[in-house]
Amino acid sequence: MTTASASDDVRFIIMGAGMSGILSAIKLQEAGLNDYVIYEKADRLGGTWRENEYPGIACDVPSHMYCYTFASNPEWNYRHPPGAEIQAYFEDVAHRYGVDSRIQFRKEITRCEFVDGRWKIEMSDGSTDEGDFVIAATGVLHHPATPEIEGLDSFAGACFHSARWNHEVPLEGKRVGVIGTGSTATQITGALADKVAKLSLFQRTPQWIVPIENPAYTEEEKAEFRKNPDAIKQIRDDVTRTFIDGFANILHEVDSPGLLAVQALCQQNLDDNVKDPVLREKLRPDYRAGCKRLVMSENFYDAIQHPNAELVTDGIERIEESGVRTVDGRLHELDVLVLATGFQPDRFMRPMEIVGREGKRLADVWEKGPFAYKAISIPDVPNFFMLNGPYGPVGNFSLIDVAEMQFSYIMQLIDQVRSGSCKELCASQSATERFDAERIEAAKKTIWASGCRSWYLDADGIPAAWPWTFDRFTKEMEKPNLEDYDMS
Ligand code: NAP
């Protein structure tokens, strides 16, 4: 990374204090670039892990892999970390690296304009700032998607999105409905089925489920991790290799042996663990495993077979004052309705107004959908880089590793300015168009395009995720090809 530089008096604006915003701050500090600020619209750091506090929330990526490579954590209590532990981890790391004091909370950026070589920032409270570079670390799954179901507002009980959990609402002894069967809904089902009076899971489409186990780490294991960081590294290396070979490198090719093995594993999981043949068939997807983002669960099938749980597969006709009416005419009476209906993954920094060179508005540039060269840079939007931007998700892989690789690539772009090679740079229009054309061709061949609905698909039905192998992503992030950049 960066060593000597011609110009270190550059100022950075980091948007967002989630995983990738904190990472950016730490990495800038490490490079001696201390003139930065993180603007965060909420009153706490943590991004996704601050926002998602639903019962059962955990990460299906194993703990020792779901952390920064430079900040391993011997204190993880489980193989798969619960959300609250991940939130505590980010708070701890931000504090240890001294970046928490650099976050300005309750600061919502509304507008960013590139004027005379600098970014001018406006915030909703009327304050302003300026910087040479902007790092957009605003997350992917950040804007909840509310389903358009007739009568949603007429429900008399408590109703909230899974990412806006209302902790004031008691659940014990209540009739709880959950709409959705993604990773979120399956985790909620696992956590609540035996705790509420009745749990009705409204399934529009079944999911393939990869079985996982989630044992607790013993005190002896944690003591060993504290004493011997190599033990953690060994686990991380092993798990990373398994993820790369078992998931991240196999999704781009529909009939890869790896994908067929995942299919067999999911089928066996369903056949072995759901006793009632009628329920089993209701839970059996008619599309390929991996087409939707894979759901990993240790307890979903047990939970949905709990006497308190009901899988509702008749479509939702409307929502009424006392519950959900399905198309078979039945009214499912409920006290609480949870919308585990996912997110709008194409929003990114929006609704911020971003204006690049010569008044070019991102809203216009992205009118047909978001794009960015290699998920990082947008033509005519110089000195502005995205982490986990469009096509950022890489084959079920940890977004932390992805963001680390992206940031090290971005630092090499920043170095071009610091060393005096140019004053501003962004991906060229032609390179972006070429990249996008190749990406679309590759995306059409991936498992995500094999015939199912999912949040990976853009408005044209093209998967908006990295369509090649993880290994290719690693290679491409090693070093920018400067010929693909407009440098002036
Ligand atoms: P999601 O995967 O997008 O699932 C949304 C669910 O809501 C789907 O089952 C969808 O049905 C259903 N739905 C949406 N609108 C509906 C409507 N109008 N009527 C009925 N059903 C409707 O959302 P998510 O579960 O929140 O997960 C999003 C992503 O977050 C995951 O894929 C994953 O990347 C991430 N996540 C990760 C973890 C983890 O452990 N690492 C945990 C949670 C979430 P259809 O399938 O029919 O569209």
Image (cartoon, grey):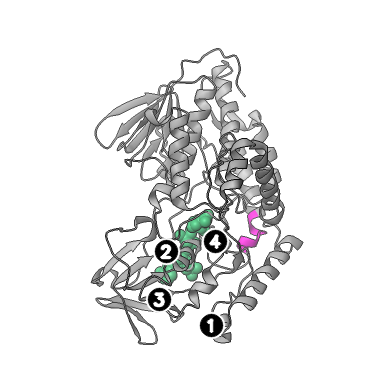
* Magenta-drawn stretch contains 447: yes
Gap between marks 4 and 1 measured at Cα: 30 Å
Classed neighbour count for the residue bearing mark 1: other residues with Cα under 10 Å, few (<14), some (14–19), many (≥20): some
Circle 4 is placed at which residue position? 461
For ligand 1, tell me if the residue under mark 4 lies within 8 Å: no
Which amino acid is tagged 2? Thr
Circle 1 is placed at which residue position? 279
In the rendered structure, the answer to whether residue 250 lies left or right of residue 121 reads right
Q: Are marks 1 and 3 in contact (CB under 8 Å)?
A: no
Circle 2 is placed at which residue position? 341
Q: Earlier in the sequence, mark 3 or mark 4?
A: 3
Residue extending furthest toward the front? 220
Name the front one of labels 4 and 1. 1
Residue extending furthest toward the right? 257
Name the front one of labels 3 and 4. 3
Nearer the observer, 76 or 351: 76
> From which residue to which does the magenta span run?
443-449
Which quadrant of the view contains residue 145? bottom left
Which amino acid is tagged 1? Leu
Q: Earlier in the sequence, mark 1 or mark 3?
A: 3
Q: Are marks 2 and 1 in contact (CB under 8 Å)?
A: no
Circle 3 is placed at which residue position? 200
Residue extending furthest toward the top? 6
The picture places residue 238, in percent across and down from the top left corner, at 70, 47
